[in-house]
Amino acid sequence: MKKKKTWIWVLAAIFCICATCITTCCTSSDENTVVETQQPTVQRITERGKLLVGTTGDYRPLSYREADGNYWGFGIEMAEKIAERIGVGIEFVQTSWPTLTADVLAEPQTFDLAIGGITITDTRKETMLMSDGYLANGKTIICRSPEADRYQSLADLDKPEVRVMVNPGGLNEKFANENLPHATIIVYQKNEEIPNQVAEGNADVMITEITEAPWYIQNDPRLAAPLLNTPFTHGEIGVLMRKGQDDLLQMVNNAIRQMKSDGTLRRLHEKYQLIYAY
């Protein structure tokens, strides 16, 4: 009888332990769900009260910084929409094409995401996160209007007498070096000044994107973009951020999808006279 009572107590103890474990597991699971719902990166941004956005400010009409420090452009408005979705203010942080990757990966973190003319590439996705595309992109050229018929292919550009100007550290320089081995490549520090350098005759051609070229040819009759509708490459522009911010990435992608579905993205394309491909 004594043994029987002992076993009853043992079984009761085991039952209590199991019940406690189940409760703990459930609580743990619930707590994990809460953590996921709170989304640690987005939560940190919310607590800070503002979204920190890295941008080059030299890429009309996607991201441009005026002399007074104010930013404007397609990408700037995209960033503002993302900040609105999170429910916080926004602060823009200056970066550059040569330092973009280092700035995204910097410790301590200097900004939450980068935006403005950043092409989605496999190389970037190996070390960082990139959002869904929100703008079609592709390599093209700007040249002087009287010489538009002269440049109709890569072969027309790839000659020693053709001076091709690019900004340093970005995909434009990479494209020129890989595809124009015989051309005279000129690296010019300020991307936003290159179209005028071409117009003034200090270079023959600028390697640029179909997102950037229309603004310059519309605002300077000395310039032309003869291959605007037949770019050398095809891609998309997206939002760039460091790995480990999957909750922020999801929110950005949700914002992009919402903007596509409710017409906001189309209206932005029309405002900046860019090709809508969605």
Image (cartoon, rainbow, N blue to C red):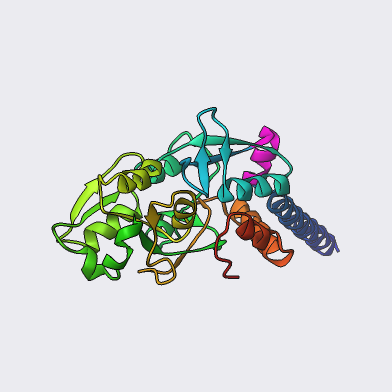
Residue 71 position in % (x across, y down): 56, 38
Q: Which residue is drawn at 45% across and 43% down?
A: 104
Does residue 255 show up? Answer: yes
Residue 54 position in % (x across, y down): 51, 41
Q: Is residue 264 rendered magenta in the image?
A: no
- Position of 208 with respect to 66 (left or right) is left
User: Residue 261 sits in which quadrant?
Assistant: bottom right
Q: Which residue is drawn at 38% across and 67% down?
A: 227
> How many numbered circles are shown?
0
- Position of 273 with respect to 98 (left or right) is right
Q: Which quadrant would the N terminus be assigned to in this image?
A: bottom right
Nearer to me, 262 or 159: 159
User: Residue 124 sits in which quadrant?
Assistant: bottom left
276 is higher (above) or lower (below) than 241: below
Residue 156 position in % (x across, y down): 22, 67
Q: Which quadrant would the C terminus be assigned to in this image?
A: bottom right
- Position of 128 with respect to 161 (left or right) is right
Q: Tell me the chief SS of the magenta region.
A: helix
Residue 217 position in % (x across, y down): 44, 54
Nearer to me, 98 or 128: 98
Q: Residue at x 70, y 59 (%)?
A: 264
User: Residue 232 sits in which quadrant?
Assistant: bottom left
Q: Residue at x 71, y 63 (%)?
A: 263
Image: magenta residue range: 41-50
Nearer to me, 34 or 205: 205
- Position of 88 with respect to 68 (left or right) is right
Does residue 253 show up? Answer: no
Nearer to me, 159 or 239: 159
Residue that protrudes farthest toward the front in the picture? 146
Q: Is residue 44 rendered magenta in the image?
A: yes
